[in-house]
Amino acid sequence: MTIRVIPNYSLYGVQAQPGWQSLFDFEWIPQRSRPYNWKIRPHKHDALIQILYLTQGAGEVLVDHSKVRFKAPCLVLIPAQTVHGFSFSEDVDGPVITAAQRPLEALVSVANTELLPHLRKPSVIPLGDVSGQAEFLMPLFLAVERETHMQAAGQLTAGMALLMAICIQMARLARVNEVTPPNADSRKSAQIEKFRSMVDAHYKEHLPISHYAEQLGISPGQLSRLCREVLGVSSIDVVNARVVHEAQRVLVYTSNSIKQLAYVLGFSDETYFCRFFRKHTGVSPREFRTKAMAAMIDQ
């Protein structure tokens, strides 16, 4: 009888080291897969979690006894102790982060225990319909890459904090991509999450509600009824609230002029923006900035 032993690696092709020796590592998918002819044989990492962000190409991942096909853009999460292997197309590209699972979980558990299940379950998360959230991913991955190559004070702390931010984005994206919700309420919530994700990506463009509805495969009236049922406000209220939120944030945390802010938020002129802001807040942008700054000083 032949006993098959699953190889245990830190990074594929490198024999495993104790998990405490390196808390996170960064590389690009072709660096590891090209020397192996784009095929990574089944193996596991005792103490390490891997997060792949495919920006180009396609492939198939073997997770334990199941095979899942994927196509860029997507995220692939492989927790520690998971037997896995990959078969990539030759045009594949994107970053890979390998991190010590237990320290990352310890950090996440302090901040938000709801994230832990997402770190412990293998997953493939398509990103084609959630550009509003996905656009924040690459800057986070590139920041981790900088920290990986940096010998400076706080490098470990900064890197782990960035990893937690990536985990938060992954959890959000996983929620948006729930395609088989267990009941009607979950289905509606998933549609709302997709709508809000699209609004996050395009609110500065002042797109009509019909555009969002078309992307969701429903009518503008259905979208507004859905928003009222789940959120208690209309679909246009959701878009306007996002614009107001960004305007308030910029007024408090930057010294941008009102004219500059109006331009950044996609308004044709300062006067139109000021009318819009007063209508939704009851005060002018300048009044809001003055009161908000005074309140921060008094705290």
Image: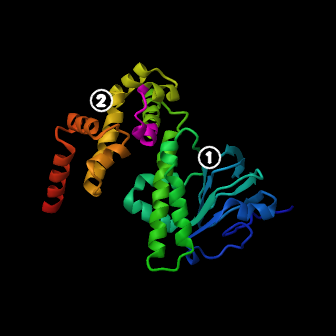
Residue at point 65%, 46% (across, down): 72
Numbered label attached to residue 283: none
Amino acid, disc 2: Gly
Q: Is residue 269 magenta?
A: no
Q: Quadrant of the N terminus?
A: bottom right
Pointer 1: what residue?
73
The residue range painted magenta reads 198-209
Numbered label attached to residue 232: 2
Q: Please state the horizontal and vertical placement of residue 208, each as a whole percent of the image.
A: 42, 28
Please tell me whether the stretch drawn in magenta is mainly helix, strand or loop: helix
Other residues around mark 2 within 10 Å, as few (<14) / some (14–19) / many (≥20):
few
Amino acid, disc 1: Pro
Let me know if residue 276 appears in the view: yes
Q: Secondary structure at mark 2?
A: loop
Judged left or right of residue 11, residue 174 is left
Q: Please state the horizontal and vertical placement of residue 289, each as a whole percent of the image.
A: 20, 51
Q: Is residue 207 magenta?
A: yes
Report which quarter residue 110 is drawn in.
Answer: bottom left
Q: Please state the horizontal and vertical placement of residue 264, each as a whole percent of the image.
A: 37, 46
Residue at point 52%, 38% (across, down): 178
Report which quarter residue 81 is drawn in.
Answer: bottom right
Residue at point 15%, 56% (across, down): 295
